[in-house]
Image (cartoon, helix red, strand yellow):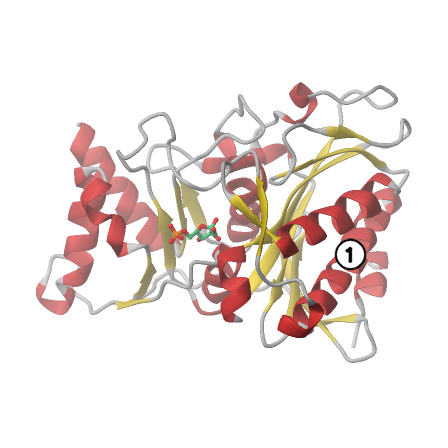
């Protein structure tokens, strides 16, 4: 079995990028170790602090963020980092050529109930090597990403990674190494499984309400087939299910907070997951455009997210196009 280090050696990606990916994998192993301890590791519960998103931080949010931040800023190839848990971007070494954005522990409301959570990361080239990074250096569309992935802390600890040549899956073995279990995975074109938080239905745009209502009509409805529903409230778990067996995941715009176009963040949730899904033959959309075409204006900006099996994402887009034509 190929381990991550040897698998990366077989690619022609920049050796410096390989070192950044090795750093991320090593940090996620440490995060996984903290999670494995569960309540015994003393990291359950919340801090008294809130992050820039206005969310109460879980103890493990803070621990995971510190682990990743310090490890990456100690890697000479990292020019700077941006984290969901940090108000501003942070400069790294002046010879670094890579910018890393990350959500250190996505789905952390699931930690205390022992449900899967994950780390999401995205790697961008810096256009200003050798100088202090600013937020503007990070504000690149998702198509500029050179690598993206996540680590899912589930029954197995699984790393899923793309460097722009397909998507590969690695599992963490007892010896502490990630071994490749699947290469070039593909999202099935069609699906009968959707993921959305139905409790927000009254806040969606009519086009999304109409689409989901048609899904729920099953064989008798206009889509003509029965759908099953899943909602883990952990994006990494949903995306991993979709990469594994297909599906469509939606966190759409809702009218509760008109200045927030959705809940999920573009730079360290929408873009990395879109890169993975598109590299695996799936599709991604804000319902108006490809997520990776969005030109970022703020490091923590939010974006409506629809991603998964191409046939279903295209159907959602059609419902929204009809609504505006
Ligand atoms: P809700 C976790 O907080 C997260 O950012 C994603 O991982 C997940 O898909 C979504 O929010 C869950 O949101 O509103 O269902 O709790």
Point 88% across, 42% down: residue = 74
Point 61% across, 27% down: residue = 140
Residue closest to the far bottom: 174
Q: Nearer the viewer, residue 43 or 116?
A: 43
267 vs 48: above or below: above
For the question of whether residue 115 can be seen, the reply is no
Residue closest to the far left: 220
Residue 315 coordinates in the image, percent (x, y): 27, 48
Quadrant of res 3: bottom right
Question: How crowded is the residue under tag 1: few (<14 C-alpha within 10 Å), some, or many (20+)?
Answer: many
Callout 1 secondary element: helix
39 lies left or right of 278: right
Say which residue label 1 marks. Answer: 27
- The C terminus lies in which quarter of the figure? top left
85 lies left or right of 266: right
Point 89% across, 31% down: residue = 93
140 lies left or right of 203: right
Residue 57 coordinates in the image, percent (x, y): 57, 47
95 vs 123: above or below: above
Quadrant of res 180: bottom right
152 lies left or right of 241: right
Q: Nearer the viewer, residue 186 or 64?
A: 64
- The N terminus lies in which quarter of the figure? bottom right
Residue closest to the far front: 48
């Amino acid at each position: 079995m190929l381990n991550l280090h040897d698998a990366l050696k077989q690619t022609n990606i920049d050796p410096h990028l390989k070192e950044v990916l090795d750093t991320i994998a090593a940090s996620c192993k440490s995060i996984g170790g903290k999670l494995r301890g569960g309540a015994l590791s003393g990291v359950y519960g919340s801090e008294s602090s809130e992050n820039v998103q206005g969310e109460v931080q879980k103890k493990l949010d803070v621990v995971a963020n510190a682990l990743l931040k310090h490890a990456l800023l100690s890697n000479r190839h990292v020019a700077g980092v941006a984290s969901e848990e940090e108000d501003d971007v942070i400069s790294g070494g002046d010879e670094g050529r890579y910018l890393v954005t990350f959500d250190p522990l996505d789905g952390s409301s699931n930690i205390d109930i022992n449900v899967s959570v994950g780390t999401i990361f995205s790697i961008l080239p810096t256009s200003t090597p050798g100088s202090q990074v600013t937020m503007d250096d990070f504000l690149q569309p998702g198509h500029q990403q050179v690598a993206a992935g996540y680590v899912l802390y589930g029954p197995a600890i699984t790393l899923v990674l793309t460097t722009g040549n397909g998507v590969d899956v690695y599992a963490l073995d007892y010896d502490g190494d990630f071994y490749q279990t699947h290469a070039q995975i593909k999202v099935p074109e069609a699906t009968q499984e959707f993921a959305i938080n139905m409790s927000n239905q009254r806040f969606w745009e009519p086009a999304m309400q109409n689409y989901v209502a048609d899904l729920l009509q099953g064989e008798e409805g206009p889509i003509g087939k029965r759908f099953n529903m899943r909602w883990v409230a952990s994006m990494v778990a949903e995306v991993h299910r979709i990469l594994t067996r297909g599906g469509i995941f939606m966190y759409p715009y809702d009218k509760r907070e008109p200045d927030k176009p959705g809940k999920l963040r573009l730079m360290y949730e929408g873009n990395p997951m879109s890169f993975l899904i598109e590299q695996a033959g799936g599709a991604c959309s804000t319902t108006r455009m490809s997520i990776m075409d969005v030109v970022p204006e703020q490091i923590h900006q939010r974006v409506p997210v629809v991603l998964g099996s191409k046939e279903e994402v295209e159907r959602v887009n059609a419902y929204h196009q009809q609504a505006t034509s």
